[in-house]
Image: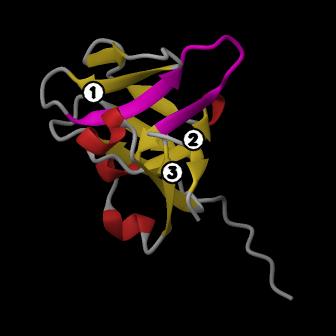
Amino acid sequence: MTVNLEAPKMLDGTCHCGKIRLTVPTRPDYLVLCNCSICRRNGALWAFYDRADMTMSGVPEHAVGYEFEPRTITTFHCRDCGCTTHWEPLQAGKTKFGVNMRNFDPDELGDLRLRRFDGAVTWSYLD
């Protein structure tokens, strides 16, 4: 048996103008398409990472946050080009961030499984 000792490939993404940059440690196992009122308007495809495992630049100086009821997350977009980049939890102790993978090179993501999440009504995965 051969063991691959290479470190996982970090992935880099940016908003359209490049002022916000996100680096995540690995390709996600799947992407989440949520139908809540903000996600469906943004057209985001989410992956989730622990904050300690990712890096961001251009935040907060180029980012604008938006909170909506029930005020559990802040969704961020670039103040210059408008691209939604990520969301951050508002609750203390929560460390998982949502990263909009539409800001990453589709060729590096490959053909990922898409999970549909009903954030509008049932707050559960539909698969």
Q: Earlier in the sequence, mark 2 or mark 3?
A: 3
Q: Mark 1 points at which residue?
A: 77
What secondary structure is marked by label 1?
Answer: strand
In the image, taking residue 125 as reference, residue 39 lies left or right, namely left
* Residue 1 locus on image (x, y percent): 86, 88
Q: Name the residue under label 2.
A: 123
The front one of 76 and 54 is 76
In the image, taking residue 24 as reference, residue 81 lies left or right, namely left
Q: Name the residue under label 3.
A: 117
Disc 3 crowd rating (10 Å Cα; few below 14, some 14-19, many 20+) is some
- Position of the C terminus, as image quadrant, is bottom right
Residue type marked 1? His
Q: Earlier in the sequence, mark 1 or mark 3?
A: 1
Q: Which residue is drawn at 33% across and 64% down?
A: 106
Q: Does the magenta stretch include residue 60?
A: no
Disc 1 crowd rating (10 Å Cα; few below 14, some 14-19, many 20+) is many
Q: Residue at x 41, y 37 (%)?
A: 22
Marks 1/3: CA–CA distance: 21 Å
Marks 2/1: CA–CA distance: 24 Å
What secondary structure is marked by label 2?
Answer: loop
